[in-house]
Image (cartoon, grey):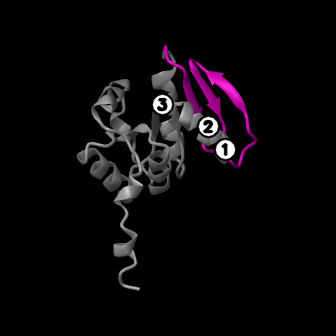
Amino acid sequence: MLLLSGPEPQRSLLEEILLEAFKDSDKRVLCVLGKPESSQERYTQGAVEVVTYMTSEELETAINASDVIISRSGYTTIMDLAALEKKALFIPTPGQYEQEYLAKKLSAQGLVPYVTQDRFTLDALGKVPLYSGLRMSHDQIRFSDLFAHF
């Protein structure tokens, strides 16, 4: 699944890169453009099924049905993918230092690989199986410590 988001023109630049890379794919690829301001449309571009946007429920279903998510490394996306325990490949938005930091940190921890937008190739997907993926571990939260100061 290709999950696009973020500010223009970077969102559209990544869209072009990914659609070109996956146009002849032998795998089923769903691309969600993240354009809620437009009407919901579905079409095919090469081997990729493209959807302009999805509701939260549709998006959760599509993410759950996907083996790997290629997306930006924004905090909300990371939390959503961790809650759904997904494997991912992150492409931080250029100039978004928080996304770059989070992508590097998660990669260094062995959770999710990342690649910069200008260096993306399909070969980057080969790194995904080498990483453990995202998951939330609720047993790591010690609420007694969290609220000890109150």
At 31% from the left edge and 55% from the top edge, which residue is drawn?
A: 101
The amino acid beneath tag 2 is Thr
For label 3, the residue is 18
Residue at the (48%, 38%) spot, across then down:
14
- Find disc 1 in the rendering and name its residue: 57
Q: Nearer the viewer, residue 63 or 17?
A: 63
Q: Return the disc, 2 or 3, that comes first in the chain's sequence.
A: 3
Figure label count:
3
Q: Position of residue 62 (x, y in %)?
A: 59, 35
Q: Which residues are magenta?
A: 26-52
Residue behind mark 2: 61
State whether residue 5 is above or below residue 120: below
Q: Is residue 6 magenta?
A: no
**Farthest residue, direction right:** 39
**Helix, strand or loop at mark 3:** helix
For this view, does 34 lie left or right of residue 98? Answer: right
Q: Which residue extends farthest bottom?
A: 150
Q: Where does residue 144 sit, x and y in percent of width and height?
A: 37, 74
Is residue 96 in view? no
Q: CA distance from mark 1 to mark 3?
A: 24 Å
Q: Residue 1 location, x and y as percent?
A: 52, 32
Whether residue 98 is visible to the viewer of this picture, yes or no, is yes
Q: Is residue 84 left or right of residue 42?
A: left
Q: In the rendered structure, which amino acid carries the disc numbered 3?
A: Leu
Q: Quadrant of residue 40?
A: top right
Q: Nearer the viewer, residue 120 or 68?
A: 68
Where residue 117 sits in the image (x, y, percent)?
38, 40
Determine crowd level at label 3: few under 14, some 14-19, many 20+ residues with C-alpha closer than 10 A: many
Q: Nearer the viewer, residue 63 or 149?
A: 149
User: Dot 2 surroundings within 10 Å: few (below 14), some, or many (20 or more)?
Assistant: few
